[in-house]
């Protein structure tokens, strides 16, 4: 056998797809045949009858030499002394159907990742690793193609498979980049739209087809293949919005968020009852949100997920907008359109867990790579999902890159981070003996805490004016405090306590409410301990909890609607930013259904369009009166007038302006009894204009009120030297402002 030939064992490793270093055998290499010096070229080709090498000599003249087919499966090898060192070349093959193909050999290219790239990734410090791992169109030495890279340190072999090789993992095995755990291959001739997966020969001997963890576009289930996608081609028109955002202090700005599940907001009945596309939503949803006065839209998770019934919370594509509504470019168009309409875009981000789907992250390389091996650390039994191993540098890099990619590629304005409580505590939803304490014997997940601090700092450093919001339901301290003050670094935290207490109060029949006054007032004891968002979310209108309207403790719809209007006015008057789930703004009667549309037909009835119009007016009051958003976080600007009138179920407080003028007085009467001549202390004398009366006829109320406002009288009351004599409509909140 000639000196250049591989041994039978070496050929077998290639043919059987067991070679970790395919570039060491395949491609062009310097070689000898007897006394002759030249090059050897080896190729493993699918369905090829013959193969030639096409190259050129030093004069630029074309040189061709044949390769011998050594194995029927497609192994070719050949030597030439016409050239003496490795150089650029192409392979020319004849296929059984008569087609002639000429292409650059994937095994003739150097690695597409540098040692520095790999070092930073392994240290968890390559924040934009999504630009390196995954699939990226590149031009290398003048040759266009796609560079593939994936992290799978325990794999025995990884191949790129797709339509281009009939999904056969023998023909495009990847190169192992040493101890980095990264596998890499540049395949010339592929481009945008190529479907692919990684065939992973796992450490456990298994053979798995895995979608790309860094993929930016995916096929619909059940195929779930990744798709090469140009995500940086969109021409943005939101530069003014981004610039203005960078100068915002959101603590002082109005934030009123409309939470949306895009699959069920509105459907096209004339087209198979399908959901709206990203481009359709870009205009129709933006129009609605703008008309209603919301400042932001928050989408339930838009990252790719196979099962619609998870509402997007079981993510398999952490870098990809779901295919359900269009392409990544379509989503970019949506965000761009919203920005041009002055509306911010927030997405739910789910770094706390991931599903067990065999095509995704679970046991990715035949080992517990992204998840903990021990189920006491690695499994959410409640949700049937797996928990990320936040102590592993590469896993943190993956999640950090995911967060940053949504800002960088898609220009979003904020993240609402799901299930933060489950990340903070090792014993979350676990009994004694079902969890492992941290190194100090405590229940806090130290690695997850550090990860959250890190990602919050990076988001704020890279994207000034971006916001992060924590869904966190415990008393963990400092969630919305800066990391330099030992907080978690979030901008805001959902106020779950206020939500539960307030809903509990309003679910009572009014006759019993006098015994529950503390449910309305208790929240003020901790209201300024965090920067809170007051929230009625999707979680409150599913699973038998009833819709917001039907939670209200009255029998008849008009009375329930009056209760709901009073609740919303109290919410908007209370210090804190606002979030309201879609449908709640018009008193959706039925529970939310993820696979249907909101009950838009209800808007023909005043009990529903009245609630909608009130929410609109509350939003515009909140936006147009700076004292309200500016003092959301300032305890000195809130004062009770009377929080003790439980006998009448009346509550009154003020939102103080830095000047007397502009101060708001809020009075709630939470019984169906009208109270005429009810006296309320006032912090300042003057005329108090009636800005909002939830009992107004245009909202569906009876119309009783205070005729647009009333002046103070020099009658001391509630510890103040002045007072107002008011008419308190039944089941109402009235908002006054000092003129």
Image (cartoon, rainbow, N blue to C red):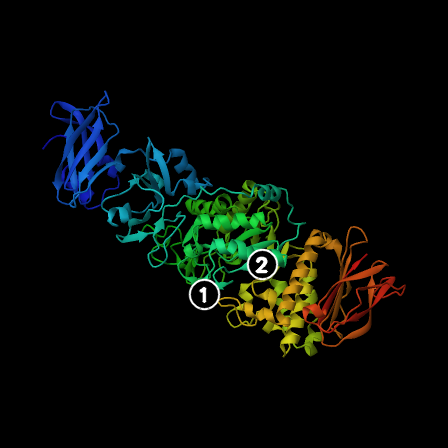
Q: Position of residue 120 (x, y in %)?
A: 43, 38
Between disc 2 and disc 1, the foreground one is 1
Residue 696 in sight:
yes
Residue 323 vs 593, above or below: the answer is above
Residue lying farthest to the left in this orientation: 1
Residue 36 vs 231, above or below: the answer is above
Q: Earlier in the sequence, mark 2 or mark 1?
A: 1
Q: Secondary structure at mark 2?
A: helix
The answer to whether marks 2 and 1 mark residues whose Cβ atoms lie closer than 8 Å is no
Q: Position of residue 431 (x, y in %)?
A: 47, 65
Q: Quadrant of residue 655?
A: bottom right
Which quadrant would the C terminus be assigned to in this image? bottom right
The numbered disc on residue 288 is 2
Q: Quadrant of residue 56?
A: top left
Residue 219 vs 6, above or below: the answer is below
Which residue corresponds to the image point at 63% horizontal and 65% vertical from the top-left? Answer: 612
On screen, residue 26 versus residue 244, left or right, reads left
Residue lying farthest to the front in this orientation: 270
Residue that badge 1 annotates: 270
On screen, residue 217 versus residue 14, left or right, reads right
On screen, residue 480 versus residue 51, left or right, reads right
Q: Quadrant of residue 24?
A: top left
Residue lying farthest to the top in this orientation: 59
Which residue corresponds to the image point at 34% horizontal and 33% vertical from the top-left? Answer: 140
Which quadrant would the N terminus be assigned to in this image? top left
């Amino acid at each position: 056998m000639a000196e250049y030939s591989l041994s039978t064992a070496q050929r077998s490793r290639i043919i059987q797809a067991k070679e970790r270093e395919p570039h060491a055998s395949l491609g062009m290499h310097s070689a000898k045949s007897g006394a002759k010096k030249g090059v050897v070229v080896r190729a493993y080709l699918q369905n090829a009858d013959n193969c030639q090498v096409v190259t050129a000599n030093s004069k630029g003249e074309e040189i061709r030499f044949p390769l011998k087919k050594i194995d029927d499966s497609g192994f070719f090898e050949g030597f030439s002394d016409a050239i003496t060192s490795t150089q650029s070349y192409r392979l020319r093959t004849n296929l059984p159907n008569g087609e002639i193909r000429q292409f650059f050999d994937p095994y003739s290219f150097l690695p597409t990742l540098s040692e520095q790239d790999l070092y930073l990734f392994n240290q968890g410090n390559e924040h934009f690793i999504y630009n390196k791992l995954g699939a990226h169109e590149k031009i290398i030495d003048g040759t266009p193609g796609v560079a593939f890279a994936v992290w799978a340190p325990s794999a025995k072999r990884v191949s790129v498979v797709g339509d281009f090789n009939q999904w056969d993992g023998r023909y495009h095995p990847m190169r192992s980049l040493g101890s980095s755990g990264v596998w890499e291959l540049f395949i010339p001739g592929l481009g945008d739209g190529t479907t692919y997966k990684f065939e992973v020969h796992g450490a456990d001997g298994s053979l798995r087809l895995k979608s790309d963890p860094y993929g930016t576009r995916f096929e619909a289930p059940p195929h779930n293949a990744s798709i090469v996608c140009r995500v940086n081609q969109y021409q943005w028109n939101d530069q003014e919005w981004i610039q203005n955002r960078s100068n915002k202090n959101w603590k002082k700005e109005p934030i009123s968020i409309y939470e949306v599940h895009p699959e069920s907001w509105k459907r096209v009945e004339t087209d198979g009852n399908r959901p709206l596309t990203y481009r359709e939503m870009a205009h129709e949803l933006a129009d609605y949100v703008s008309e209603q006065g919301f400042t932001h839209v928050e989408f339930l998770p838009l990252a790719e997920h196979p099962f619609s019934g998870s509402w997007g919370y079981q993510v398999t594509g952490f870098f990809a907008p779901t295919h359900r509504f269009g392409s990544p470019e379509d989503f970019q168009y949506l965000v761009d359109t919203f920005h041009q309409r002055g509306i911010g875009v927030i997405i739910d981000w789910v770094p706390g867990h991931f599903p067990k789907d065999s095509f995704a992250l679970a046991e990715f390389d035949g080992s517990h790579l992204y998840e903990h091996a021990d189920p006491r650390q690695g499994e959410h039994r409640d949700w049937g999902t797996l928990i990320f191993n936040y102590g592993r540098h590469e896993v943190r890099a993956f999640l950090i890159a995911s967060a940053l990619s949504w800002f960088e590629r898609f220009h979003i304005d904020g993240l609402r981070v799901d299930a933060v409580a489950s990340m903070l505590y090792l014993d979350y939803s676990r009994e004694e003996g079902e969890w492992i304490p941290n190194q100090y014997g405590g229940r806090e997940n130290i690695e997850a805490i550090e990860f959250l601090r890190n990602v919050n700092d990076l988001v704020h450093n890279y994207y000034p004016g971006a916001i992060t919001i924590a869904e966190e339901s415990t008393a963990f301290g400092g969630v919305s405090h800066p990391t330099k003050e030992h907080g978690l670094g979030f901008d805001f935290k959902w106020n779950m306590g206020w939500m539960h207490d307030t809903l509990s109060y309003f679910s009572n029949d009014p006759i019993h409410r006098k015994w529950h006054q503390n449910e309305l007032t208790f929240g003020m004891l901790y209201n300024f301990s965090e920067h809170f968002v007051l929230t009625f979310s999707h979680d409150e209108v599913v699973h038998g909890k009833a819709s917001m309207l039907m939670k209200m403790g009255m029998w008849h719809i008009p009375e329930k609607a009056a209760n709901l209007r009073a609740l919303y006015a109290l919410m908007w008057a209370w210090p804190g930013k606002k979030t309201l789930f879609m449908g709640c703004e018009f008193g959706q009667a039925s529970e939310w259904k993820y696979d249907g549309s909101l009950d838009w037909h209800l808007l023909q009835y005043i009990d529903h369009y009245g609630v909608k119009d009130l929410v609109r007016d509350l939003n515009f009051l909140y936006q147009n009166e700076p004292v309200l958003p500016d003092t959301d976080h300032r305890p000195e600007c809130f004062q009770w007038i009377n929080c003790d009138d439980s006998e009448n179920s009346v509550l009154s407080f003020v939102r103080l302006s830095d000047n007397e003028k502009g101060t708001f007085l809020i009075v709630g009467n939470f019984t169906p009894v009208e109270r005429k001549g009810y006296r309320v202390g006032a912090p300042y004398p003057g005329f108090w204009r009636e800005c909002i009366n939830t009992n107004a006829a245009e909202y569906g109320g009876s119309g009783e009120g205070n005729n647009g406002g009333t002046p103070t009288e020099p009658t001391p009351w509630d510890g103040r030297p002045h007072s107002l004599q008011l008419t308190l409509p039944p089941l109402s909140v009235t908002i006054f402002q000092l003129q």
